[in-house]
Amino acid sequence: MTVALPITPSSTEFLKDRIARPLARGLVTILRGRRGDPPPAEPAETRVDIHRQPLRTALDWHQDMIAVWKRNPSFGPDLHDDLKSTGLLPRCVILTSRDGGPLCFRYIGEPTRRVFGDRWADQNIGKPHLEDVHGAYAQAIDAQYREAVEGGEPVYNHLVITGLPRPPVNYRHLLFGWSLGHRRQALLALIDS
């Protein structure tokens, strides 16, 4: 036999005070938008201002890289060894292409990692630079990369990037390019941030 116990008014009040009212207040607060993080701001348009600089204004260690470049007319293991021995490798970004394909990230050094983060750098190794999540930046910088590779002379620029998910980024890069034959290319960017 089942015995039903009557619910007393004090039991009902207990439920309202302890559970229902706080739940209702929390729901109203959330619906009014007073709880939690604010919605993400609309992404600002990425803008890249590139200002060509004369090579004579390059920093001392940029000048050291020009000497390394002159000692290494071809891109290969000797260049890598020279970069390591002079301490310049950690400041570099290295991209190469194969069989006429796009320039792909092969090495991303410390200054670029500081700007975009280690996660971004690790995810982009081996990927074409034009597939970067910062598409407007990649498009803007591509012409500079092509000029360095196809022109055979270093390209020195001061860049200001706005609209990334961080304050404006100011840096200088010195770009060196190599055409390696068989539709292969290489680019080394020496970064000062």
Image (cartoon, rainbow, N blue to C red):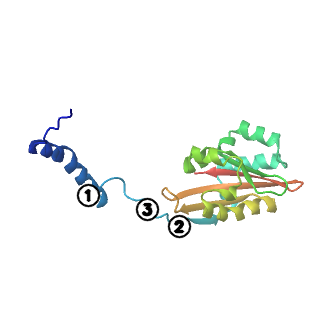
Q: Residue at x 82, y 52 (%)?
A: 98
Q: Residue at x 65, y 60 (%)?
A: 138
Q: Which mark is residue 45?
A: 2
Quick one: 154 or 80, which is closer to the camera? Answer: 80
Residue 85 versus residue 148 in the image, above or below: above
Left or right of 119? Residue 97 is: right
Q: Nearer the viewer, mark 1 or mark 2?
A: 1
Disc 2 to disc 3: CB gap under 8 Å: no
Task: Measuring from the top left, give residue 181's x and y in whole percent.
Answer: 89, 54
Q: Amino acid at mark 1?
A: Val
Query: Callout 3: few (<14), some (14-19), or many (20+) C-alpha neighbours within 10 Å?
Result: few
Q: Nearer the viewer, mark 3 or mark 1?
A: 1
Q: Is residue 52 visible?
A: no
Q: Is residue 171 visible?
A: yes
Q: Residue at x 43, y 62 (%)?
A: 41
Q: Amino acid at mark 3?
A: Ala
Quadrant location of residue 146? bottom right
Mark 3 and mark 1: Cα distance apart in space: 23 Å
Q: Nearer the viewer, mark 2 or mark 3?
A: 3
Secondary structure under tag 3 reads loop
Secondary structure under tag 2 reads loop
Q: Amino acid at mark 2?
A: Glu
- The mark that comes first in sequence, 3 or 1, is 1
Q: Which mark is residue 41?
A: 3
Disc 3 to disc 1: CB gap under 8 Å: no
Residue 163 versus residue 98 in the image, above or below: below
Mark 1 and mark 2: Cα distance apart in space: 35 Å
Q: Residue at x 55, y 65 (%)?
A: 46
Left or right of 38? Residue 128 is: right
Disc 1 to disc 2: CB gap under 8 Å: no
Mark 2 and mark 3: Cα distance apart in space: 12 Å
Task: Measuring from the top left, give residue 59's x and y in whole percent.
Answer: 64, 52
